[in-house]
Image: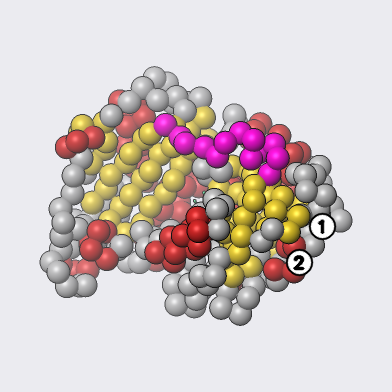
């Protein structure tokens, strides 16, 4: 496997960075997770835009243009002869000293890993996923803007540990005042009386690319949609619940905290959106030739 590292394609074993890199020492950096379907890099421009917005929000000056970043992603996929892939694009503050001072980091570190995607088992998409509510609360949105996709994932990891301890794969994260924010690595939607709802991002959710795509699909099929602050009770009593994310795509949720959602099956709306999403993954992105 070849990894893009600071302008060069290097063997996986040689793709190493300094222990003084602030991405490692402080989680000081930004990243993206991107999917590639049959040589179509899904929503690549949207991911690149979010990466540059995240970098701007932490005052990290990107060392290359968006066009060159796109070229680097394609170059890495081609070098690994991948048609379907999960792409991890990471930009750290770079190598500094042991202090926090980002001015000591002269050059950002850029790396791109392209790998095979590991998915939730197929049956979860048919039967639905069981999740829990994490006891770990979401970071305060006023303290750390949730729209920044930073390398600081400890808040999410602690909630993921809550999920694992309960024997499930995902967990809902609540805000300090008990509104639903999102899951550890996915956004959350509910359907009630044919209406689609998701929490606004400023409660503490990442503005997911898949989330935005689903909102677009709802408009396309004429389904009413709105952002709404949701309490857990509204999620429990929803007709349908599903999660969205680059890796998970759209996945139905049929049990939360051992409570059955709707009739315990994925319902009608979620599979409909899953179908529409599948069509979109064949159309909306940047195509390349191997
Ligand atoms: N929320 C969090 C915390 C995430 O890490 C992710 C991405 N894995 C998402 C939501 C979904 O975002 P996207 O659809 O852009 O992958």
Residue toward you, 49 or 188: 188
Q: Which mark is residue 276?
A: none
> Tag 2: Cα neighbours inside 10 Å, few (<14), some, or many (≥20)?
few
> Which residue is at 75% across, 62% downward?
236
Answer whether residue 117 is magenta in the image. Answer: yes
Q: Which residue is mark 1?
A: 192
Distance of label 1 from label 2 (alpha carbons): 9 Å
Can residue 137 be seen here? The reply is: yes
* Residue, disc 2: 234
Residue closer to the observer: 251 or 94:
251
Disc 1 and disc 2 in contact, CB within 8 angstroms:
yes
Instruction: Give SS at disc 1.
Output: strand
Q: Position of residue 17 (x, y in %)?
A: 18, 49
Badge 1: residue crowd in 10 Å (few <14, some 14–19, many ≥20): some
Q: In which image quadrant can residue 228 be found?
A: bottom right
The quadrant of the rendering that contains the C terminus is top left
Return the residue found at the far right: 193
Give the left or right position of residue 9, taking residue 235 as reference.
left
The span shown in magenta is 116-128
In the rendered image, the residue lying farthest to the top is 290
Which corner quadrant of the image does residue 234 belong to?
bottom right
Looking at the image, which residue is at 63% across and 68% down? Answer: 180
Looking at the image, residue 90 lies above or below residue 277? below
Residue under the point 26% across and 59% down? 23
Q: Residue at x 70, y 53 (%)?
A: 255
Residue 152 percent across, percent down from the top left: 37, 63
Cβ of mark 1 under 8 Å from ligand 1: the answer is no
Front residue of 58 and 252: 252
Residue 191 seen anywhere in this rendered image of the structure:
no
In the rendered image, the residue lying farthest to the left is 97
């Amino acid at each position: 496997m070849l990894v893009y590292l600071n302008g060069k394609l290097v063997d996986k074993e040689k793709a190493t960075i300094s222990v003084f890199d602030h991405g490692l020492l402080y989680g000081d950096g930004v990243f993206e997770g991107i999917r590639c379907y049959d040589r179509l890099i899904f929503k690549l421009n949207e991911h690149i835009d979010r990466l540059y917005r995240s970098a701007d929000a932490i005052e990290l000056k990107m060392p290359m243009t968006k066009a060159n970043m796109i070229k680097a992603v394609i170059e890495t996929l081609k070098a690994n002869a991948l048609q379907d892939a999960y792409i991890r694009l990471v930009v750290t503050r770079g190598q500094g000293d042991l202090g926090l001072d980002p001015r000591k980091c002269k050059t950002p570190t850029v790396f791109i890993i392209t790998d095979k995607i590991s998915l939730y088992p197929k049956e979860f998409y048919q039967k639905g996923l069981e999740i829990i509510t994490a006891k770990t609360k979401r970071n305060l949105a006023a303290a750390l803007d949730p729209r920044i996709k930073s390398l600081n994932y400890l808040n999410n990891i602690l909630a993921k540990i809550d999920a694992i301890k309960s024997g499930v794969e995902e967990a809902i994260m609540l805000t300090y005042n008990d509104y639903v924010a999102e899951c550890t690595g996915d956004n959350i939607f509910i359907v009630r009386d044919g209406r689609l709802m998701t929490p606004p991002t400023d409660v503490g959710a990442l503005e997911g690319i898949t989330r935005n795509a689903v909102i677009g699909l709802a408009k396309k099929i004429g389904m009413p949609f709105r952002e709404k602050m949701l309490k857990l009770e509204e999620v429990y009593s929803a007709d349908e619940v599903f999660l969205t994310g680059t890796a998970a795509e759209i996945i139905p949720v049929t049990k939360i905290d051992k409570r059955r959602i709707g009739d315990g099956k994925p319902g009608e709306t979620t599979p409909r959106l899953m179908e529409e999403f599948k069509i979109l993954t064949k159309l909306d992105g940047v195509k390349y030739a191997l």
